[in-house]
Image (tube, rainbow, N blue to C red):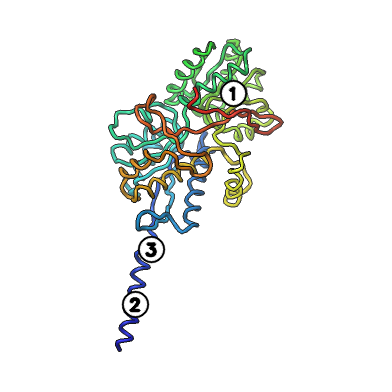
Amino acid sequence: MMKSIKVLALAAAMLTAGASHAQEELKIGGIGPLSGGGTAWGLALQRGIQMAFDEVNAAGGLKVGDKVYTPKLVMYDDKYTAAGGRSAADRLINADNVKFIIGPIGSPSVLATVAATTPAKVVLLSNGFSPGILKNEAKSPYNFRVVDSTVEFGPPMVKWFRDNFPQVKKVALIAPNDAVGQAVIPQLETYYKANGFTVWTELYDRGTKEFTPLMARMMAQNVDALDLNSNAPGESALLLKQARQSGFKKPIWQIGGPAVDEMMEIAGPLAEGFISLNVFDFGSPQSTKFVETYRKEFGSGVINAQTPMWYNAAKIMMEAMRRAGTATDATAVRDSLQKLEGYDAGLYGPVRWGGMGDYDVNHQLLLKFWMVKVQGGKQVAIQALDPEKR
């Protein structure tokens, strides 16, 4: 009888110990455009985050303190709009009870999301180029930007363009007539004029498909180059394609994106010679395993360069939780994120936070980026640039 009691007690203890280490589901929100002109970016965001979660779950889960979590992505489509971003954020915060959100992409959606996440004290890792995303009145902001914006990559890119295209004197800037265009165009005008260029600008309604009349007006201005700046992939590709079809043979490039693969896919041979930036070097040694994993999960289609960027963001978020010792206290995780300098998620090198001079807070992740050109139907890296060397 005594032996049976001891056996039962041991079994109960083992069950209790097992239960204490049972994994808990950890919901992490995702917001991005899964429809409309920014779909390529939204899919890149969703897939990058999912790859990071799959990786940690395959290794046994996310170990935080004495708990083990199974990260789960709860993803909503913001349709690349402010209303969609706010709706998705409200749903994640109030219905799904998340404390951490990755995304969205695009200033209108991000600004609307920040308006919901900041008062709710929800940590947000996003990517929109408006300075207001980081430079706001919140005393303890919970939002971080996980890739360089126009403020970081604009000045070195314009200097590079000036040095490599000395024949260009007048540049056309064409952008959507919304928060994106209204924020980015003045910035770029300043950078171009500081480097001796003159600028012609025009805004269009987001969702426009026919740009031929706009191209005629642009060519009448005798511009020497067209900058597609921060247009979404679908609209950038149409602008590029229709500019070439209209007979514009001068340089076309983009201080924004990145979406070179999508541009090539939509514009076809007319993308030849197009120049832009890319936030990831798929020719680097560290990219090999990442690309192999992507192919296994998502097939042989185009890998948007933002996919590794959002993978990197998700890894940074989880590392901050590990170091904070909590996956529920958003303030502690925010504080941990701010101290994450030097952590290397494996693709971009050590974390570098900047932004104090531009946004009054060091919540801007600084990433090296590459100038690329479409040559022979392929994307070729020209030169690496550093956002800190403006």
Q: Circle 1 is placed at which residue position?
A: 253
In the image, what residue type sits under mark 3? Answer: Ala
**267 w.r.t. 120: above or below:** above
Q: Is residue 271 visible?
A: yes
Few, some or many residues within 10 Å of mark 1 (<14, 14–19, 20+): many
Give the mark nearest the N terminus, 1 or 3: 3
Q: Is residue 156 or residue 274 the one in the foreground?
A: 156
Query: Which residue is farthest front?
Result: 342
The reply, left or right, for residue 373 in relation to residue 32 is right
Q: Circle 3 is placed at which residue position?
A: 22
Q: Name the residue: 59% across, 36% down.
A: 281
Q: Is residue 188 or residue 147 the one in the foreground?
A: 147
The reply, left or right, for residue 366 in relation to residue 278 is left
Counting from the top left corner in percent of width and height, residue 43 is at 52, 42
Q: Circle 2 is placed at which residue position?
A: 10
Q: Name the residue: 43% across, 21% down.
A: 182
In the image, what residue type sits under mark 2? Answer: Leu
Q: Is residue 219 or residue 210 the one in the foreground?
A: 219
In the image, what residue type sits under mark 1? Answer: Trp
- Circles 1 and 3, Cβ within 8 Å, touching? The answer is no
Q: Is residue 307 visible?
A: no
Q: CA distance from mark 2 to mark 3?
A: 18 Å
Q: Is residue 178 or residue 338 the one in the foreground?
A: 338
